[in-house]
Amino acid sequence: MGQLNFAANNFIIPNIVYAFNNASLTFCPLELFDSISWATVNIINKVAGTRTVTKTFSISIGLYSLNGSSLSLANSIFGSQTHQYSGNKGGYLSLTSASATQNISPGTWWLGLLISSTAQSTNLTGNLVGQNANLSAANAFPGGFIGGAMTASTNALPGSIATSDLDITGQDAFTQPIIILTA
Amino acid sequence: MRINIFEAGPRLFHNVVTGTLLGEGSLHILGVEIPGSISFNNVAMIFSGSGAVSENLTLSLGLYSLNGSTLSLANSASAATGLTLNQTAFSWLTFATSATQDITPGNWYFAAMSSTSLGGGFSLVKNAGVVDLASSAHGGIFVRGIMTVSTNAMPASIATSDLYKEGDPSISAAIAGRTHPYILISA
């Protein structure tokens, strides 16, 4: 078993942005072939709008394992970053404040993304870059859990959550921002 | 574990576009995670051309590993062809590798560079790149970005401090700097 220096859920990055669920929790899978330390998590954001704007993103990402039908919090990482955008600009948000040192073992993990940003009401929406647009199944995926979202607002990562409590239809089940873990 | 196919990005990705790379001498560097062993033998990209002009096209591809803060060239491949760019469809462009190698599982870096000599244009299938991704670079070790110092060959080693990480405001002007070609390796 090897040790990775970086891992990503996709190495091809599209020019697709979507509005994240502000102050709500979205789960997406992370498949690891080898181990990697839980040190830095990068996601990409972009602001829609043409004016110069300063936005502050408050981000918590939970690392969850799935046991049966329950997601259990194994670790988390936090960050609050302020970026100034001169219209339509985007950049990486890099989180480095892990709650605990951990070498993540290979397998399927789940990332719970809890993001809120300022200025959501000024038509300068904060977006994530990834896959979401135009993918919206009316019914639930018939197999195991592939992703979903909490429908209620939350301000903290839950220690555990039942997948039955998540919305797994529509875009929520497909939402998958580009995520790059780096050592 | 052995794998027979590795793609730097899935074929079915619906936001793949075509376009040029940065100009001659600039390296597009893409870090990837290869899940199993595969021979670095049949390497290909997909290109198209237009304009019915004669062109000498060269594409170079380097396979690098990261040791500390230095990328070291492990292997390279090139494709050079003189052709008339009047294709109405995409074509595979296959590479000749410089040495036999079995790529071991783990992290590797592809460095791609293109050149033309007669002024004709061609396009590669690649990712779209995020328009105006130029406010902040990714954190941690180098994963993806470009080298803008001009070179006419794959460097034997590259200090990551000489590279621009993707998202770096210094390379904000060039969308091409945030794109990477589709690469297929098959056993």
Image: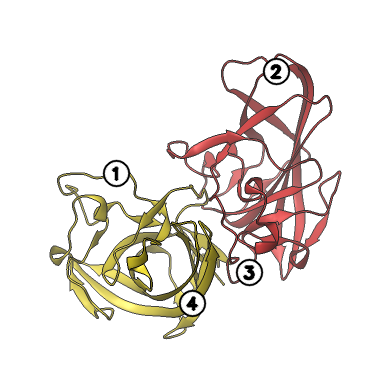
The yellow one among the chains is A
Output the chain of dot 4.
A
Output the chain of dot 1.
A
| Residue B140 in which image quadrant | bottom right
Give the Cα separation between the discs numbered 2 and 1: 36 Å
Label of residue B141 in the image: 3
Q: Is mark 3 on a helix, strand or loop?
A: loop
Type of amino acid under label 4: Gln
Q: Kindly identify which residue carries mark 2.
A: B85
Q: Which colour scheme is used?
A: by chain
Give the Cα separation between the discs numbered 1 and 4: 29 Å
Q: Is mark 1 on a helix, strand or loop?
A: loop
Type of amino acid under label 2: Leu
Give the Cα separation between the discs numbered 3 and 4: 19 Å
Type of amino acid under label 1: Leu
Q: In front: mark 1 or mark 3? A: 1
Q: In front: mark 1 or mark 4? A: 4
Q: Is mark 2 on a helix, strand or loop?
A: loop
* Visible residue check, residue A111: no
Tell which of B153 and B19 is nearer to you: B19
Residue A169 relative to residue B161: left or right: left
What colour do you see for chain B? red
Q: Are marks 1 and 4 in contact (CB under 8 Å)?
A: no
Give the Cα separation between the discs numbered 4 and 2: 47 Å
- The answer to whether marks 4 and 2 sit on the same chain is no
Q: Kindly identify which residue carries mark 1.
A: A135
Q: In front: mark 4 or mark 2? A: 4
Q: In front: mark 3 or mark 4? A: 4
Residue A140 location (% of width, % of height): 16, 49
